[in-house]
Image: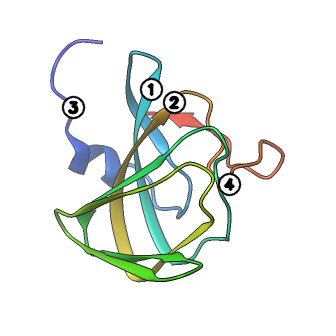
Amino acid sequence: MTGEIDLKAKLASFDDHWSPRTVASFNGYDVMVVKVQGEFRWHSHPDTDDLFLVLKGAIDIRLRDRTVTLQQGQMFVVPKGVEHCPFAREEAHLLLIEPTGTPNTGDAVTAATRKVL
């Protein structure tokens, strides 16, 4: 892959929520954009941390003992094995970075099919 990646253009190319789109890969990691709204589901990733970077809007990352609220330009890393439930009151746009093949629900059976833009 060569050239710049326009994240706004990538996000404008789809409308569905909670369905990450891979926009680049490097060193065994996928860089993804996703639109989110409403509640996702409680889940954890037993083998990897989970990075959330808010590009637009705001989200809450609900943890069992607290809630982390992120605004545009802020990020949070959920440590591996920690249950969390992302929630967005209004549509938000996120950048995610995780090892290639990591299921977004923590379970390959219930995960969204990975799409590449």
Q: Residue at x 59, y 60 (%)?
A: 82
Q: Quadrant of residue 115?
A: top right
Q: Earlier in the sequence, mark 3 or mark 1?
A: 3
| Amino acid at circle 2 | Pro
Q: Mark 2 to mark 3: distance in Å?
A: 19 Å
Q: Label 2, on which residue?
A: 99
In this rendered view, identify the residue nearer to me: 67 or 9: 67
* Disc 4, SS: loop
Quadrant containing the C terminus in the rendered view: top left
Residue 65 disc label:
none
How crowded pointer 3 is (Cα within 10 Å; few <14, some 14-19, many 20+) is rated as few
Q: Label 3, on which residue?
A: 5
Up the image or down, 27 lies above or below 79; here it is above
Q: Label 1, on which residue?
A: 29
Q: Earlier in the sequence, mark 4 or mark 1?
A: 1
Asked if labels 1 and 3 touch by Cβ distance under 8 angstroms, the answer is: no
In this rendered view, identify the residue nearer to me: 39 or 79: 79
Residue 105 disc label:
4
Q: Residue at x 67, y 70 (%)?
A: 42
Q: Quadrant of residue 84?
A: bottom right
